[in-house]
Image: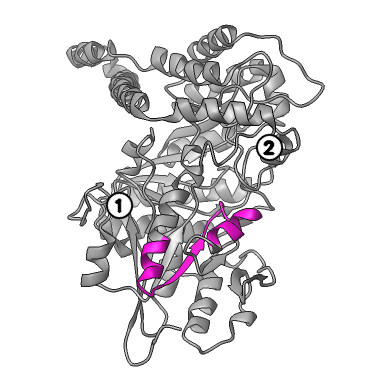
Amino acid sequence: MVNFSGKRHRLRIIVPAYPALNIYSHLANITTALGPICVASVVNRLPRWDAEVIDENNMRRYGPRNDSDKANHDFLQKHRPADVVGLYGGLTSTIPRLYKIARFYKDKGVVTIAGGQHFVDDNIAEALSSGVDYVVIGEGEETIKELLIAIQGKKKIINVKGIAYRKDGDIIYAPRRDPLTDFDKLPLPDFSLVRYSKIKLYPVERIRGCGMDCEFCTVKGKPRYASPERLLGHISYLLETRDARHFFIVDDLFGQQRDETIRFCNMLKDYQKSIGRRLDINVQIRLDKAKDFELLSAMRQAGINTVSIGFESPIKEELEAMMKHISPEEMLSFSKTFRKFGFLVHGMFIFGYPLKEGVTLNMSADERVKRYRKFIKKAKIDTIQILLPVPLPGTQLRDRLEKQNRIYSLQDVGWEYYDGSFPLFKPDDTLSAEEMQDSVRKIMGAFYQFKYFFKIGLNIFSFPGLIFFLHNIKLGWRKWHRSWRNDLIRFGGWIIVKEWNLKFKKDPFLKKLQNAKRHLEKGY
């Protein structure tokens, strides 16, 4: 037991760095994870406790780094010792780094706590054997308060709900904690607790949970709602204290609890009008919300400019396997509606989704690539993200593939590859693992190209053409800006994809993949 007497105590929550091969590093450099901030904000209000968050993916403001360009925890612990360290396991691909950090702090006598969606089933035992003292199961705001009190010796560990830990060699699972429903009793997430970061895109939330029950998704359960007033209060606070202009509402599906969502949009519109400031907001939303014109109109007036939409696939059989109750034809129609309302559309796809038993799709990799490229062009999607299926822990997809004995062994293909860029299981008979990965690069390579560098210049020279829109300068600006912005992003995307490809060639993944395939065939 750590000696907590006679001093203030420090909880340091760490967001582990992405693996070196990760196409999201550029986005991570301007934002951060919301969950660790929510937990730190609760702890920071406890008597005699200070909390801080270290996001290893965003340390642009004088962050101490080691030789591997990650956070220098030896330096941090010497100059600002932590009594307890929390480790964010929300992304499975960061788990090897999380365990390395956990062992470092545990060796120094620091209590280590881990939480996040990765920690389900056997992964809890894995964590407790990898330098983690306690695993928080589910949401952490209430659990962390009780756990810290128990660690101080002021409460029995056995009475803390929502955790797992080892005792005398056995794993003890405490009773589950009910999901939070009263969000107003929580403090607003305090971004000032994130040290060393420069945040441009601020994550905020109103709704937790999602009732869509997609097979590949870890977010389950009945949606739980905070009030629109709370979300508006958070946005206004960030604008007034941090001059925040760009927000990402991280709710899995914006538009749940429809009437309250529209009320929030109207409140946000009025707020921006009253202060004379226009905000930029990105949300995740279902395609079929395109049928709700009142909602779309309220969203646009509120400053919601970009919608991130899970198209998933333009292939009917794959959509059915994912339990997506929509057809490719409907997706094209809905996408057209979002564009008509002036939204920038970011399309998210999953290539090579494994079909369920009894369903066949005799389509080659090349034909699938053609289908994707044709659909993306026809839908006029502004930006795209193509991932491979990831059998994440705790998902129905992983359960199905495990029963079919199709997942490559973690001894061959470790957690660090679970980011959507690598094949992780034996694909359907019409595809090979190598074809799946090559197909993603072909689709992304056709969309993000060097030629857009020249189009950026052409767009700049076309700017005077706005004179032809003097009757509707707002429409003219929107058309010009959309084209300029998309060309800029597509050129930037080309740089990112090129950089990823260069790093991939130096990585031993292909060799590991061959071992994984061979071991799967032999049954070990």
- Residue 218, relative to residue 83: is it above or below? above
- Residue 170, relative to residue 64: is it above or below? below
Q: Does residue 61 appear left or right of residue 39 in this picture?
A: left
Q: Residue at x 47, y 43 (%)?
A: 93
**Residue holding disc 2:** 397
**Residue holding disc 1:** 275
Question: Which is nearer the eye, 195 or 174?
Answer: 174
Which SS class for mark 2?
helix
The residue type indicated by label 2 comes to Leu
Residue 423 visible in the displayed image: no
The image shows residue 238 at horizontal and vertical percentages of: 33, 57
The residue type indicated by label 1 comes to Ile
The magenta stretch spans which residues? 102-127
Q: Residue at x 32, y 28 (%)?
A: 503
Q: Residue at x 50, y 51 (%)?
A: 90
Question: Which is nearer the eye, 123 or 49?
Answer: 123
Q: Is 123 within the magenta?
A: yes
